[in-house]
Image (cartoon, rainbow, N blue to C red):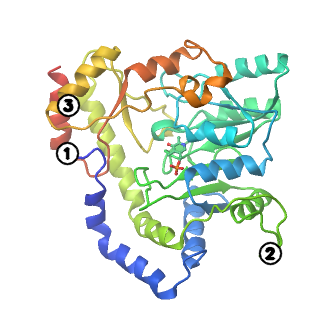
Amino acid sequence: MQFIDLKRQQEGIRARLNQRIHAVLDHGQFIMGPEIGELEQRLADYVAVSHAVSCASGTDALLMALMRYEVGPGDLIFTSPFTFVATAEVIRLLGATPVFVDIDPSTYNLAPDQLEDALSRAGQGGDGRPRGIIAVDLFGLPADYPAIGAIAEQHGLFVIEDAAQSFGATLNGKRAGAFGQVGCTSFFPAKPLGGYGDGGMCFTDDADTAAVLRSIRIHGQGEHKYDNVRIGINGRMDTLQAAILLAKFDIFPEEVRLRQEVAARYTAMLQSLPGLTLPQVPPQASSVWAQYSVLASSGAHRETIQSALKRQGIPSAVYYPTPLHRQTAFRDLGYVEGAFPVSERCAQTIFSLPMHPYLTREDQERIADAIRLV
Ligand SMILES: *Cc1c(COP(=O)(O)O)cnc(C)c1O
């Protein structure tokens, strides 16, 4: 059994992939070829925003979004400590300071009341100027943007959506990527819409923001190729990667539906088991289930479940074993153990089950049986 079965997906779209890849080999525009614009248009339409700017990775998408706001030393950016390292890494890369804010225990996303508290504390201190928020849509579920957006507006902050895991999810009828001033997603192979290599995209409704992101993506380019108006990066997506993503996007809406079916089956099979906390999706939201993550009753309980699964040849994973405020790279920020109890508790007890659109009911029954026998 695979944790994510990309082989099975490839079998279904092999002809489409070959056709798309060969078209690029034939036209030879490997940098910023026509597939780049085609993918940007199709995904902007899907997310229902005016502009999409493709780039080399989800990390670059976040970095470019922060660069759009000229984030730098002395700036405070509020974000979750319970996320992949890239979310906070880009803040530090620009010399700014991440301010961690604990998560909501039922969604694993930034808790708006904790954000208010962190902002009122930051207002009293003198160690930086609050500039923005990076909210993360963890495991594929959008964060609480109505509440986060209201707080941001009150304090004059920008909101960046880290939609690396949530492309295809919705909240109040809007698609992930469309929240905040800039939505950033990733096409790392294991993400809901994954390529065959690295890739990312920024989404925005603001034409000026889109123009600045396009400039940052290519070395701060101005009107002409050798006219540089700002410091940027080499953040382009490869044409070949866009071609592959176009082939995969054809079946993506169907795959989102299948993921939701798989998740619903897990919930039905596991809900009567004692000691497990299953993932919750608020009624106004849908998740794209980048991960199906469950809380065990303790660290020891998690260990027992994971070894029982392993004995049956069933893979499982832990996202994330160490919250960012306890990572070595962030140690100098001075956070102590216990600073974010919800994140720390989740890190100790959470585990994720195999999740992909082609997971069969039979395999899920085997998984549920293995857990039931613990
Ligand atoms: C994967 C991921 C990223 C980074 O995306 P890459 O394409 O790997 O650079 C950022 N944030 C979160 C929450 C992620 O899961």
Identify the image quadrant of residue 1.
Answer: top left
**Do the numbered discs 2 and 3 sit on residues whose CB atoms are within 8 Å?**
no
**Mark 2 Cα shell of 10 Å, populated few (<14), some (14-19), many (≥20):** few
Look at the numbered disc 2 and give the secondary structure of its residue: loop
User: What amino acid is found at the position of numbered circle 1 in the picture?
Assistant: Met
Q: Taking 323 as reference, is 149 left or right?
A: right
Query: Which corner quadrant of the image does residue 336 belong to?
Result: top right
Looking at the image, tell me whether mark 3 or mark 1 is earlier in sequence order: 1
Find out if the beta carbon at label 1 lies less than 8 Å from the nearest ligand 1 atom: no
Q: Secondary structure at mark 3?
A: helix
Residue positioned 70% across, 50% down in the render: 65
Of callouts 2 and 3, which one flags the residue occurring earlier in the amino acid sequence? 2
In this picture, is 363 found above or below 255?
Answer: above
Residue at the image point whose x is 41% and y is 82% from the top = 22
Please report whichever mark, 2 or 1, sits nearer to the chain's N-terminal start.
1
Residue 16, position as x, y percentages in the image: 36, 75
Residue position marked by numbered label 2 in the rendering: 226
Could you tell me if residue 347 is visible in this image? yes
Residue kind at label 3, given as amino acid type: Leu
